[in-house]
Image: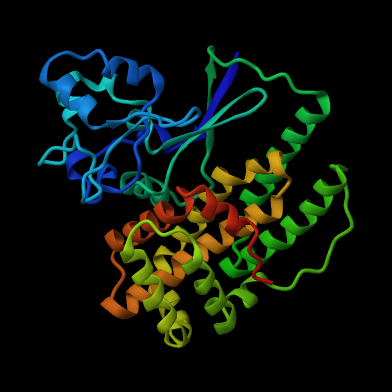
Amino acid sequence: MGYLRYPSYYPKFRCTASACTHNCCLAGWEIDIDDETLTYYQQVDGACGDRLRAHIALPAEPGETAHFMLDTQGRCPFLGKHNLCDIYTELGAEHLCQICTEHPRYYDWFSDGTEAGVGLCCEAAAELILQNTSVPALEAVPDDDFEPEALSEDERAAEHELFRMRDELFHIVKAEPYLPLEERMNRLYSTAVNMQKTCDTWMFSAAEAAYVPNWTDAFWQLGSLTRLLDFFLTLEINEPAWRDLLFETKAQLPELLRHRQAFLSCYQDNLYEYEQLLLYFLYRHFMGARWDGMLCGRVNFALISTCMIQLLDIQTWLTEGCLTHARQIDLCRRYSEEIEYDEENTEKILLYSIL
């Protein structure tokens, strides 16, 4: 028996379907069809079956996956005029392909169990993530179907130590007594640097501390932000509007930096949202270090992602005269959609250095 572990808000997730302002079937993503569902779709009779098969692109080469062919607007061909899924209404929820059933849920498998969460790219999920004001309590339930992975004792010990490190990072984000957010970010980075040194030597014990300059001082500089936005513009871009936003932000950088403290003062009651973003990115990405050893890169990813969203917040606040909750949700969703849901973009940011 294993466990299924998730943040306390995870069970509260509900798809808002046609009420969603950015339906995931409109996102322009290629929607893969798992083999079991494909077999079922190929056997459906009548007009529904004919329509299914007419809009499925079969694998061209071994190792590829069948997928739905999007229309010219990037819509799923089965998204009806009221933004409801025709497959759902005609065949039932049990016959949706796996990605449509699970999105935006994600899973990560470990030696003794599974972790789950919901992705920031979904506005309903972003609402849950941002509304929390404390360290997300991780709840666990028994998972009778889990099959333990055969790992050596050393591999299990390394995995457990990474979990301990992640917990340490969580508690830096929600430090007691309260510390300014930038100080906590700097502590996150310096702690990650020393954790990396420990990991690199595979000595999960005391490691010699290294001097690390303040990460936030380096980030919030005109030169650093200019280079960072130039770098983001080299990444793969899903929606042209994202590229436009990056260009507009880059053009306004001097003004954004001048008004940053005014924005933080105005947004004081909502600054906990950046804590929640840090916790989300750490929870979702940090444990990937067990495969590549990039602890510091994943903490750096969380810091860059959180500060990039804050930079876009300032740009929106100045341009539109305010930053509404709906706009904050939309900016988080857009960032996640463009960066987290493109594996190459995520990997490139893991290697990007601010310092």
Residue 108 position in % (x across, y down): 56, 33
Query: Vertical placement of 269 versus 39: above or below?
Result: below
- Give the mark count: 0
Name the foreground residue: 170 vs 224.
Answer: 224
Give the residue displayed 67% in from the left and 24% down from the top: 111
Residue 312 position in % (x across, y down): 41, 70
Q: Indicate the quadrant containing the N terminus: top left, top right, bottom left or bottom right.
A: top right
Query: Vertical placement of 170 versus 87: above or below?
Result: below
Residue 178 position in % (x across, y down): 59, 62
- The quadrant holding residue 77 is top left
Query: Vertical placement of 22 versus 264: above or below?
Result: above
In the picture as drawn, the residue positioned furthest to the front comes out as 60
**254 to the left or right of 182:** left
Name the foreground residue: 328 vs 246.
Answer: 246
**190 to the left or right of 244:** right
Name the foreground residue: 181 vs 278.
Answer: 278
Name the foreground residue: 121 vs 76.
Answer: 76
Query: Vertical placement of 18 versus 185: above or below?
Result: above
Give the residue displayed 57% in from the left and 66% down from the top: 181
Q: Is residue 176 visible?
A: no
**14 to the left or right of 157:** left
Give the residue displayed 83% in from the left and 29% down from the top: 154
Residue 68 position in % (x across, y down): 29, 34
Q: Indicate the quadrant containing the C terminus: top left, top right, bottom left or bottom right.
A: bottom right
Q: How is the image coloured?
A: rainbow
Q: Is residue 320 visible?
A: yes
